[in-house]
Image (cartoon, helix red, strand yellow):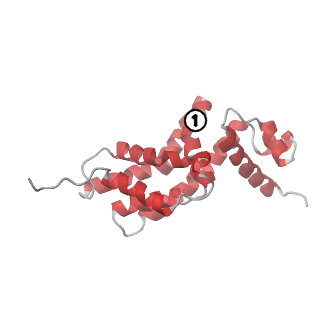
Amino acid sequence: MPHTENDLREQILDTAKSLFIQQGYHGLAMRQISEALGVSKAALYYHFKDKEELFLAIISNSLDELESAIDGIRSRQVSYREQIILFVQHVLGQPAEQRAMIRLASQEMSQLSATARKKFDKTYHDKFIGKLQAIFQAGVGNGEFRPLDPAIATWALLGIMYPYFYPAHTGATPVRSEIINQIINIYLSGVAQPQSNSS
């Protein structure tokens, strides 16, 4: 059955996403993508002018999904602490490929042209990092979080989640709920036992 143009574009995005996660940006050639799809390189270049445009389209799709999830969380009538918990549960509860896209977005940007990096940095901030920072900023503002730099709080949160953005380390399935809960507790409460007030 012949592909429609939209079907083929979606298949290119899906196949290329898996290959980028496995091999990285530098290690993957357009020829390998066309071979994996069983289509000509000309068909690939009809939809995407080069590897950079294809990579950015994949990252953009992932950021759109992430933005939608964070907007949904922020719209709920819950505390800012609970919003952070919901974010961690959402991301780590996803299949490994979706989690891996967050790592790929930050890890592979140095491979792109300066123009593409500049455009991507703004999108990455507007759709993702800036929205997380806004949760921390609001939580600090209303006294729910102690005074802290929202940017550092955001990167610290992503740092503790980062190992789970590697499918090879964590498996293909969503992270188990007991592990997600431990990560949340370590981030929000620390690892030290509360100090006793008794002398």
**Who's the residue at 31% across and 44% down the image?**
149
Report which quarter residue 80 is drawn in.
Answer: bottom left
Q: Which sits in the foreground, 52 or 194? A: 194
In the displayed structure image, the side of residue 174 where residue 33 appears, left or right: right
- Residue under label 1, please give it: 109
The reply to whether residue 137 is in sight is: yes
Quadrant the N terminus occupies: bottom right
In the displayed structure image, the side of residue 22 where residue 138 appears, left or right: left
Q: What residue occupies the far front of the structure in this picture?
A: 199
Q: Amino acid at mark 1?
A: Met
Label 1 element class: helix
**Who's the residue at 86% across and 57% down the image?**
3
**Who's the residue at 36% across and 57% down the image?**
185
Residue 197: x percent and y percent? 12, 56
Q: Residues within 10 Å of mark 1 (few under 14, many from 20)?
A: some
**Who's the residue at 43% across and 47% down the image?**
160
The reply to whether residue 101 is in sight is: no
Report which quarter residue 2 is drawn in.
Answer: bottom right
